[in-house]
Image (tube, coloured by chain):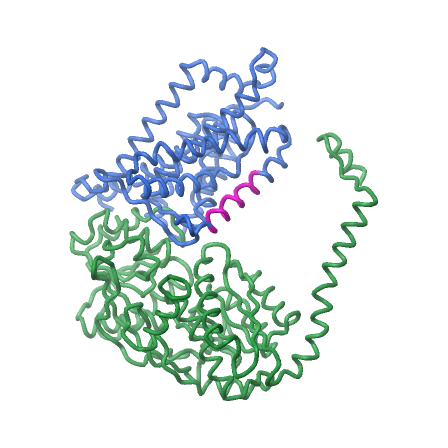
Chain colours: A blue, B green
Amino acid sequence: MTFEDALQQALNGLSFGALLFILAAGLSLIFGMMDVVNLAHGAFYMLGAYVALSVTRATGSFWVALVVAPLALAVLGLIVEPLLLRRLRGRHLDQVLITIGLSLVIADFIRLRDDWGWGATVRSLPVPPGLDHSIQVAGSDYPIYRLFVIGFSAALALLLYALHRRTRLGALVRAGVGDAQMLSALGVDTDRLFTFTFAVGAGLAGLAGVIAAPVFGLQPGMDVDALIYSLIVVVVGGLGSLSGAVAGSAVVGPADTFGKVLVPQFALALIFAIMALVLLFRPTGLLGRVRLGR
Amino acid sequence: MSDQNHLAAQRGYHYRMSRRAFLISTSAAALAACAPSTSTGGNAASSAAASAGKAMKIGQLLPFTKVYAELGNSMKRSTDLYLKAKGNRLANRPVQVIYEDEANDPQVGLAKTQKFIDQDQVDVMLGVVATPIAYAIRNAVDSAKMIYIATNAGGNALTRTTNNCTPSCKSPYIFRSSFSSYQISEPIGEYMAGKKNVKEVFTFVADYGFGTESQADFNTGLTKMGGKVTGTLKAPLGSADFVPFVTQLKAQPTKDIYSFFSGADAVKYIQAWNQLGLPAAGYRMNGAGFLTEQDVLAVVKEQANGAITSLFWAVELDNPENKSFKDAYQKEYNLLPDVFAVQAWDGMRALDEALQQTGGDTSDKPKLIAALEAVKFNSPRGAFEFDKDTHNPIQDMYIREVKTVNGQAVNTISDKIGRVTDPGK
């Protein structure tokens, strides 16, 4: 492999990792705050992509969809959390079951909505005008949208970091991750905080769906793929922390890409092998902290 | 039990069932268990003496969930349309079709096939999209002596003589109305090296049984005419990201690429192909026909322009049968038929023609097999008949090029390779 090829593949890996970050951030946030492994995260991602498809068709603008679809998913989160998850608080197995159930309902709903232009056939969201061409990178054409994904994801990470570290809301979330019971004893309405967190997590899944749709397309099964990748990212990076999601996606994205290039027969196993190694030697993930039992 | 209740109590609920709830649920279960068994009791007698005039049961094993759900829907639409056109009677016998979902899982497919054999006692069975499922049910079908017409699954071994029948092998009871992977891959290899004088080709296929088979068959055809495959790249089935692979295609010097992908993979491949500027860099896309079927073209549109593929049908194919098939399908469903609809249609048509020869008799298996072997008709794809040796169709292969016609990306027919049959081993 020449240096130019390696550079191109590094960009491919980086942009894949950037997408994974947006996807995993929501999952990680929900887990860190609420101690819920939201297995409907992949379905939220899928629904975000399909909502974006409908919005883009209706308004002709990708950018409107980029705002509307995450908001729609956040609203869904606002409904789902109090309705389904609140009464199962602390019952992990039951939460797992209900979120799997929810993901099946969403995936089947999308499959049956042929009349909305969704359905079981492959769909695609066009790359927004202005970002649909290629530029010269290292002596070869490179799609500009992928560079946009890297930039967008980095900006999002900075924004989330600032919210997390510099605002009152961020402080509440951090306190909730640390000890939700104590937070509640101090007079904070943790129910509202949990609902809000879940809505933000769902919105982030929707956002990932919109951003990924022009690259990966829309088809049945995309929810499961997304869920598996995001679970790997949060396990590798460390559950429940923003920096963990960054670290996880920075490892898994390039590893997946270079795995496909250098050892294609082993590509799928490679990221699972990385996950297994991390679990063996750093069970809390690369940047995870030791959690005290609750 | 008490442990369980204890655990449940800790979580704030309990498992204990009231006597009334117990009675209701068990009697419901008992009723549910009885219902099918009483009905099969009646059928056991009738199907043993299946003869003209009695209702005929056709089992259709199709994917209605998972990744191939839309293929299953298309094949069901086509089957329903055929029967509707025939007034729901074949050879003067009323027909009952039983649809089951194979869920793209060999174990589920096998269980549903057993249901067709034991419980429904169907007269014939059709369907199956994915090759591994067809391989998984092969022995069950063969030992039950049930006539089965595969309407998609294209793995070569299903209609071939193989060592120890691994992974599968032909059976007198198995026919195929679709294609073998040899048929859609080998002729285009011969065509490229022989007729187009393309001597060097790089191959890029999906890394699973069918992709590997297509690659090998293409290689056979190309080498036969003095060409050579300069290298091979494989992508795992359902890869999320195709750009890393296409980057590798661009990093190697052979300009002609042969590919086998379908559905979502094909869409991602063609999009990555354009994003990375391969057409401008002089690369040419070739492949087995599923690479540019309507489901793919509807999404990628003119991005696939110039791609050359081979298949036994195209929606644009100009013959009277295709025209009337398309018209009927469009009138019923307001949709253009796809290649899967044609395969299901031809499966029903072949069965219909054979039943007319046997006078609707499905109980005499050798007679029905002989009738199916003798079937000849004009299908939407052109002349159709089964190879008596393999039970795989003998059919024309069309070389198609994607072009924009009247603002729509379509497969235009540029050449034809006549009467292609599978070598059978």
**Apparent side of residue A161 relative to residue B147 in the rendered image (left or right):** left
Query: What's drawn in magenta, residue-wise?
Result: A99-112
Q: Position of residue B397 (x, y in %)?
A: 30, 74
User: Can you say which quadrant of the picture contains the N terminus of chain B?
Assistant: top right
Instruction: Based on the picture, tell me whether residue B384 belongs to the magenta stretch.
Output: no
Q: Residue at x 59, y 22 (%)?
A: A292
Q: Residue at x 73, y 33 (%)?
A: B13
* Residue placed furthest toward the top: A186
In this picture, is B393 found above or below B33? below
Number of numbered discs overlaid on the protein picture: 0
Depth check: A263 or B18 in front? B18
Residue B425 in view: no
In this picture, is B289 found above or below A191? below
Q: Position of residue B412 (x, y in %)?
A: 23, 67
Depth check: A87 or B143 in front? A87
Q: Predominant secondary structure in magenta?
A: helix
Instruction: Based on the picture, tell me whether residue A111 belongs to the magenta stretch.
Output: yes
